[in-house]
Amino acid sequence: MSMKQELIKKIENKTLTMGVCGLGYVGLPLAVDKAKHGFKTVGFDVQAAKVDMVNAGQNYIGDVVDADLQELVSSGMLSATTDFSKVCDVDFIAICVPTPLDAHQQPDISYVKNSTIEIAKHLTKGTMVVLESTSYPGTTEELLKPILEEGSGLKCGEDFYLGFSPERVDPGNLIYKTSNTPKVVGAIGKDAAEVISMVYSAILDSDVHTVSCPAVAEMEKILENTYRNINIGLVNELAILCHKMGINIWEVIDAAKTKPYGFQAFYPGPGLGGHCIPLDPYYLSWKAREFGFHTSMIEASMMINDRMPEYTVERAGKILNRYKKALNGAKVLVLGVAYKQDIDDYRESPAVHVIEEFHKTGANVDFYDPFIPKYRNKGVWYGGLAEINPEVLRQYDLICITTAHTPVDYEMVANVGVPVFDCKNVTQNVVNKENIEVL
């Protein structure tokens, strides 16, 4: 029986052992879905604390159901380890590690590289390796393939299969989770593409779209988020223009989205946040320079979005000026440090950058976020207010709303008499708008 036939048989009778490298926002939900669909799953992570929590059935990811994790761990279907030698026990391993930017805004693929090196040491014949971490087109074939072959002594396509299937995790999305979001798969060779696609079809309640090679899948992921980056950059630029013209950009967008075709609504804000949209365009523009090509439209949108925190603070300063106050020495309360509403994730959050900009002006800044009591930035921890009420709010010279968390009583915030700079249009239904300015 060929390697392909053996793997197909294991998929069909669910004797295939799954592995997930990286137990964060992408990896843990994926591991849970694999185990829920009847495949014994092993999670790998270099952080012992995460491994211990998983093995104790303690959940730390919002998109994972606590009861699901506890049941899967107690039944032996899901376990975690820091010991990469156990890679030899799995038939399929997905790499779901961070791919951030370094201090020079260039791709940092060290997590992917180091994980691949560890996997290569223990890779056995008949294993499927799939990169899910977002990276530049060519990563799978140019980086992973040589490392795996040299580190294991095995031949890609003959002894093991290698592919790329981009993660599509949207933390806090109430409709689309890992299990029901369509998957894209690109692999080296037709057999690899077929078998890896079969794996995802067996563990997800969604369609699997197979493309011709990993580079197509890698570029597809970049396209998804660059599309959003560019459109958000467009609407942010229009927001700046509309403010100068005395036009409400939010009303403009509401009017435009009545068109049933040819328009998708994007909204302005104090910047871009999250694990993909602010980062992915940098991966593409970096790779493009290898071919002597400059992604001018993409780079322009990145410049606009990157400047929004600074613009937000400039607008805040002008609001205070109207009240005969300066930013230097002013007491400012930032409402929300998560990068999007109703989640506890502050990766690349624009609110964190807004706070940094306020600090540069000499303002005294506090924050309140019902989902994030504290956050870490550049090695320093910052603690937020435990609660807000009219008495607390009246202590500030300005309230800046940077995240649209639904548990916050914005009617109360608007009615305490303190100037409010609303960057998310959450006060649109407040009747008395005398002290409110919207981005």
Image (tube, rainbow, N blue to C red):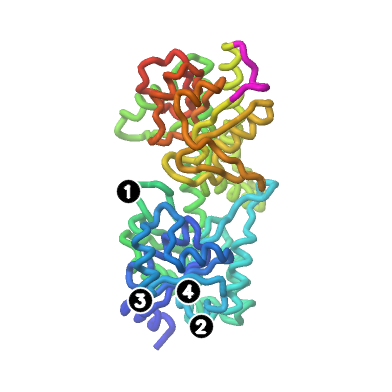
Q: Which mark's residue is nearer the viewer, 1 or 3?
A: 1
CA distance separating discs 4 and 3: 12 Å
Identify residue for label 1.
Answer: 175
Quick check: 307 above or below 381? above
Q: Would you say 297 lies left or right of 378 here? A: left
Quick check: 223 above or below 110? above
157 or 144, which lies in front?
A: 144
Counting residues from the start of the chain, the first of labels 1 and 3 encountered is 3
Q: Position of residue 119 (x, y in %)?
A: 57, 73
Counting residues from the start of the chain, the first of labels 4 and 3 encountered is 3
Magenta-span inclusion, residue 329: yes
Q: Which mark's residue is nearer the viewer, 4 or 1?
A: 1
Q: Would you say 14 lies left or right of 330 here? A: left
- Label 1: state its secondary structure: loop
Question: Splitting the image into 4 quarters, where does residue 108 fall?
Answer: bottom right
Q: Range of the magenta residues?
A: 324-331
Identify residue for label 2.
Answer: 125
Q: Amino acid at mark 3?
A: Ile
Identify residue for label 4.
Answer: 128
Counting residues from the start of the chain, the first of labels 1 and 2 encountered is 2
Judge whether residue 95 can be spotted in this image.
no
Do the residues under discs 1 and 2 have CB atoms within 8 angstroms?
no
Residue 11, label in figure: 3
CA distance separating discs 1 and 2: 39 Å
